[in-house]
Amino acid sequence: MRIGAALAIAALAAGAAVQVASPASAAPSAVVSGGSATNSVAKKTATAVCPSGTRVYGGGGDVTGGGHEVALTGLRPASVLVGGKFVDSFTATAEEDDTGYAANWAVYAYAICGAPQPSLSIQRATITSSPGTDRIEGSVSCPSGTAPLGLGAEIGNGAGNVVLNEAIGNYTVGPFGVPTGWAAAKAFTDETGYRLTWTLTTYAVCAVPPPGLTYVFTDSAYNSVDKSASSECPLGTKVYGAGGYLNYLAGQVHFDRLVPHGSAWTGSDVDAREDQTGFTPNWWATSEAICAR
Ligand SMILES: [Ca+2]
Ligand SMILES: [Ca+2]
Ligand SMILES: [Ca+2]
């Protein structure tokens, strides 16, 4: 894998003239999962660990059995060096609402993993709430020349009173014609508010743009019921990362599921739900799939 990355970097440095005879596939090579226990503990996490020699591109999380009272509150790509080798993973966290939830439920994490990508890094930024704040909007930029392959967002110290509302990213041309990679996240306090201090961390897994890099956004129906949205990658590409967005800026709708999908991992899904007491206005959900060859 290291040799493949070195060849890829050499090819980039030399421009299009260099052809690598058998380049390492840039596409994700594995989607792995991990699950929590199934019980009624109020906050649980699950971690999916990438196979040895692969790096995390992105991932997702899925709550099962959570009804309208358990929300995804953390989607976190991570990388640690163990004995000089990267051990990469994706962790999903879910929490019961502030009034609790009697039934048993579980959370699953999915990690999209593959060959090391040139200049891969995990960027993060944390914002702490001010007293009485009902929302935090966070963002991170990718290092120059790199684009987000995967996304993440995580609430700290929300104690079931704060839900994620957005984890999206893109590679867009800025005011001076320079492409910039970025990720953004939002979180909101619930219907009854929250007095304590909480945090939102935004994550982006950044790398040199792989061939065919495309950001696909798909909106659900616009109404006042639980809903899903699915994004399909262009033919010949696979999903590297998943994201989502809930258009209504309130803490009364949440992510129940935000995952890569398909037997060949060619898209992503978002399932979004209203809270325990429901939510009257119309709203929609958007899924994002970050796709490349
Ligand atoms: Ca409850
Ligand atoms: Ca509350
Ligand atoms: Ca409500």
Image (cartoon, rainbow, N blue to C red):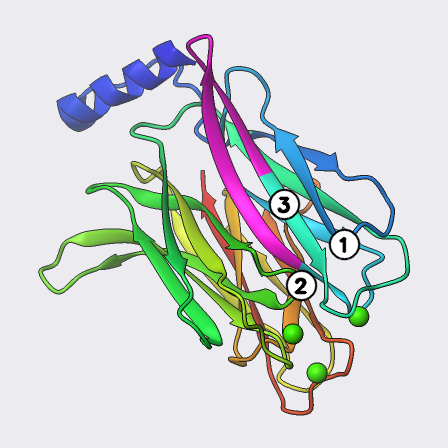
Q: Is residue 228 above or below residue 262?
A: below
Mark 1 Cβ and ligand 1 under 8 Å apart: no
For the residues labelled 2 and 1, say whether their Cβ atoms are less than 8 Å apart: yes
Task: Please state the extent of the stretch shown in magenta in the rendering.
Answer: 72-90
What amino acid does circle 2 point to?
Answer: Gly
What amino acid does circle 3 point to?
Answer: Ala
The residue indicated by pointer 1 is 42
Q: Mark 3 or 1, which is nearer the eye?
A: 1
Closer-to-camera residue (208/163): 163
Residue at point 64%, 81% (across, down): 192
153 lies left or right of 110: left
Q: Position of residue 159 (x, y in %)?
A: 64, 60
Q: Is residue 222 above or below residue 142?
A: below
Closer-to-camera residue (90/156): 156
Q: Is residue 57 visible?
A: no
Q: Considering only order in the chain, which callout, 2 or 3, is on the residue closer to the N terminus?
A: 3
Secondary structure, mark 1, is loop
Secondary structure, mark 3, is strand
Q: Mark 3 or 2, which is nearer the eye?
A: 2
For the residues labelled 3 and 1, say whether their Cβ atoms are less than 8 Å apart: no
Q: Residues within 10 Å of mark 3 (few under 14, many from 20)?
A: many
Instruction: State the quadrant of the N terminus.
Output: top left
Cα distance between the residues tagged 3 and 1: 14 Å
Mark 2 Cβ and ligand 2 under 8 Å apart: yes
Q: Is residue 145 above or below residue 155?
A: above
Mark sitting on residue 160: 2
Q: Considering only order in the chain, which callout, 1 or 3, is on the residue closer to the N terminus?
A: 1
